[in-house]
Image (spheres, grey):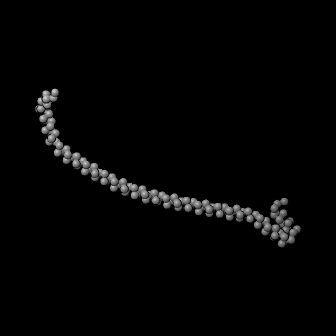
Amino acid sequence: MDSSATEQLAEKSLPETAISEVRDAAEKQANTPAQITNSKIGIDAERIRSSISRLTSNSTDELEKLVSKLQELQEFLKSETNRVQSEIGSVLDGVGIIIEAIAPWKTDVSANARTNGRDKLKRWP
């Protein structure tokens, strides 16, 4: 017998109200675990969504702070690089001036050393 024939036989033998009560009870039992499961899954899903949202929000805030600090550090490094380059330029200018001032003495000393170098050695004991 197929299921439709069984339903028709059951409907003929039982009063109509009893059949509807049995159907309603069966539907409630069938739907109750699914509803509980669905609501539990929904609650868990919402909890997971809120956790992910909170964690990504915290991560985003931390990343924005890090980017801000890195930009400040970059500006500081640029200013220090410019300052050091300026100081190096000043030092090189100063060395150039010193070299120009010493250059005449160097030629005088080397000329004296060539002419009088032997005389100085003779004076030593």
Q: Position of residue 103 (x, y in %)?
A: 16, 42
Report the front residue among 11 and 30. 30
- Between 23 and 90, the one nearer to me in the picture: 90
Q: Is residue 84 above or below residue 120?
A: below
Question: Relative to residue 39, is residue 125 depicted above or below?
Answer: above
Indicate left or right for 45 with 64 as reference. right
26 horizontally vs 92: left or right: right
- In which quadrant is the C terminus drawn? top left
Residue furthest toward the right?
13
- In the orientation shown, which residue stands out farthest toward the bottom? 17
In the visual, does 12 lie left or right of 117?
Answer: right
Residue sitting at 33 percent across and 55 percent down?
79
**Residue, x 83% and y 72% (percent of image)?**
17
* Residue lying at 71% horizontally and 64% vertically, measured from the top left: 35
Comparing 12 with 94, the one in front is 94
Return the x and y of residue 106 as percentages of the image width and height.
Answer: 16, 39
> How far across and down, in percent of the image, does residue 95 sit?
22, 46
Percent of width and height locating residue 88: 28, 49
Q: Residue at x 14, y 42 (%)?
A: 104
* Figure label count: 0
Give the vertical position of 102 relative to 42 (above or below): above
Position of 115 with respect to 66 (left or right) is left
Q: The N terminus appears in which quarter of the rendering?
A: bottom right
